[in-house]
Amino acid sequence: LVLKDAMKNMVLWDVYEIYSSNVKLHGVKCRRKIRNFGVRNNIDVIPENALDKENVVRFAVISETNIDKLLDFIHEQFSDVNIENIAREIKNPVLSKWKVNDGND
């Protein structure tokens, strides 16, 4: 009960996947570039390499954040990528292997 009460006040995140069949995303500082862009532009963003999918990077931003500049930046850095919103208003996401950390594991 205490954990459920604590989760009521948690930050809500929107989660996205970046993927490409032509552009390498792991080992090319993709996460660092996204993280640094967030710092420079005052966007709370958490990027992580997916461990459960090949050549996928996931990132989370606080729900309702305008990420147009971030999406443009990612497309500028990695020309042939797709970016898909996979979840909205998620509490405590685990990005490396897509799940919600609800404290029950």
Image (spheres, helix red, strand yellow):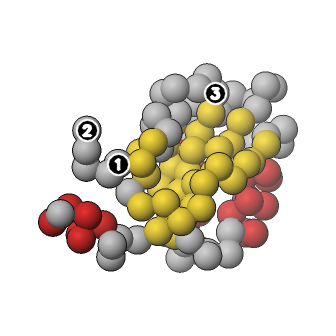
Q: Which mark is in front, 3 or 2?
A: 2
Residue 69 in the image: state x and y as whole percent.
73, 69
User: How far separated are the C-alphas under marks 2 and 1?
Assistant: 8 Å
> Secondary structure under badge 1?
loop
The residues tagged by marks 3 and 1 sit, at their Cα atoms, a distance apart of 23 Å
Q: Is residue 92 above or below residue 48?
A: below
Image point (74%, 48%), residue name: 83
Report the amino acid beneath label 2.
Asp
- Residue 10 visible, this angle: yes
Q: Residue at x 48, y 27 (%)?
A: 51
Can the viewer see residue 27?
Answer: no
Extreme-front residue of the structure = 1
Q: Residues within 10 Å of mark 3 (few under 14, many from 20)?
A: some
Task: Write down the residue under mark 3.
Answer: 55
- Residue 21 location (% of width, % of height): 79, 25
> Within 10 Å of the Cα at label 1, are there few (<14), some (14-19), or many (20+) other Cα atoms?
few
Disc number placed over residue 101 in the picture, else none? 1
Rendered view: 79 above or below 50: below
User: In this image, 27 relative to 105: left or right?
Assistant: right
Q: Are the two marked residues, 2 and 1, in contact with CB atoms closer than 8 angstroms? A: yes
For image coordinates 84% across by 38% down, the residue present is: 80
